Amino acid sequence: MPRFDVTIAGELNLDLILYGLPDELPPERELLADRMMLTLGGSSSIVAHNLAALGSRVGFQSRIGDDQLGQIALERMEQGGVDVSRVRHVAGATKTGFTVILQRDAWRNMVTYSGTIVELCWEDLDFDYLTDSQHFHLSSYYLHRALRPRLVELLQRMKASGLTVSLDTNDDPDDRWEGGLLEALRYVDIFLPNEREVKLAAGAEDMETAILRLADIVPLVVVKLGPEGALAQQGTKRFTSPARRVEAVDAVGAGDSFDAGFLHHYLRGADVPTVWQEPIWREPSRRRTQEAQKPSGMWNTERNSWQSTAGSQVRDPRDGQFTSSSIAAKW
């Protein structure tokens, strides 16, 4: 039996989210935010953290700087139950990546110091560790600049070792959508884009063409549709899930939380229609220690919702549960 259910190699960093700022930021003015939150950032680390919170056995590889921000991020992962024994601490001028998010009601600005985020490289990877798993997940395809020349080889190696593979590209900061993505998708079993990314990945003007084009390459394409819910194309079969009405507190990390919820249930043998109905939060697995079973975050009494250190904050008004579809509704 493999040591892990899922292994992930990717970025590990923190996000600083500031709320209540004006839309326009005039120069040479000191502007006051009315709230802030320091939270686990990086799509790879959010997926890993939330998979572990759901009860999956997760192994995580990354590179961080020898600094306090990297240590805080590492501790957040450990508290969530993720195995971080193969995360590399690298001394030098490059520090752990960091993102500042200026959150408005309907949109946001994001400013990132890439730091170690883009420096994870082939030599950092422990393949005995990564392949001791049922499944391998990769996020942030275009942020892995040092690793990107060998990403296709990485996915090939995972498949050759008998793992299934999932990919969420996230955005391309250069907005080129090149870098061998279509070749990489030939070694992917589950592709998890949003409605914008699916068109850009396929090079198609409309979503329907994009989905069908990608479904010829990837066995399962799962598209996050924001307020329309989610859609899955599995060969010629199509499954849809409407968005559930939720009280949204914060949508940062919602797509990554969707990925974690979907993968957790699907990799346990649930078919897609069953996955749509599964709650994204269950009682933690008894395999982990009591300390590791505690979800990383706190209950926000003012907003009556769980405020996690990784991923979005939503509450289903019907039963108070967090659900994969409800998270998709806000991404």
Image (cartoon, rainbow, N blue to C red):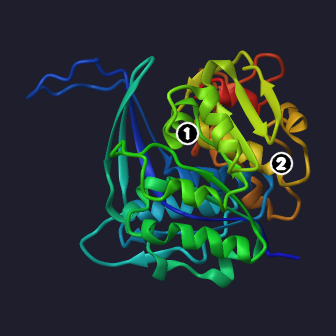
Residue displayed at 71% across by 70% down: 159
What residue type is disc 2 on?
Answer: Tyr
Point out which mark residue 189 bears: none
Residue displayed at 63% across by 81% down: 127
Nearer-the-camera pick, 177 or 285: 177
Q: Residues within 10 Å of mark 2 (few under 14, many from 20)?
A: some
The N terminus lies in quadrant? bottom right
Sequence-first tag of 1 and 2: 1
What residue type is disc 1 on?
Answer: Gly
In front: label 1 or label 2: 2
Q: Give the residue at the far left of this rendering.
A: 28
Where does label 1 land, which residue? 253
Of helix, strand and loop, which one carries label 2? helix
Image-quadrant location for residue 3: bottom right
Of helix, strand and loop, which one carries label 1? loop
Q: Position of residue 105 (x, y in %)?
A: 44, 17
Horizontal placement of 229 versus 250: left or right? right
Q: Residues within 10 Å of mark 1 (few under 14, many from 20)?
A: many
Residue displayed at 83% across by 48% down: 266
The C terminus lies in quadrant? top right
Q: Is residue 139 visible?
A: no
Image-quadrant location for residue 254: top right
Q: Position of residue 31 (x, y in %)?
A: 21, 25
Q: CA distance from mark 1 to mark 2?
A: 20 Å
Residue displayed at 60% across by 34% down: 210
Where does label 2 land, which residue? 266
- 323 shown above or below 3: above
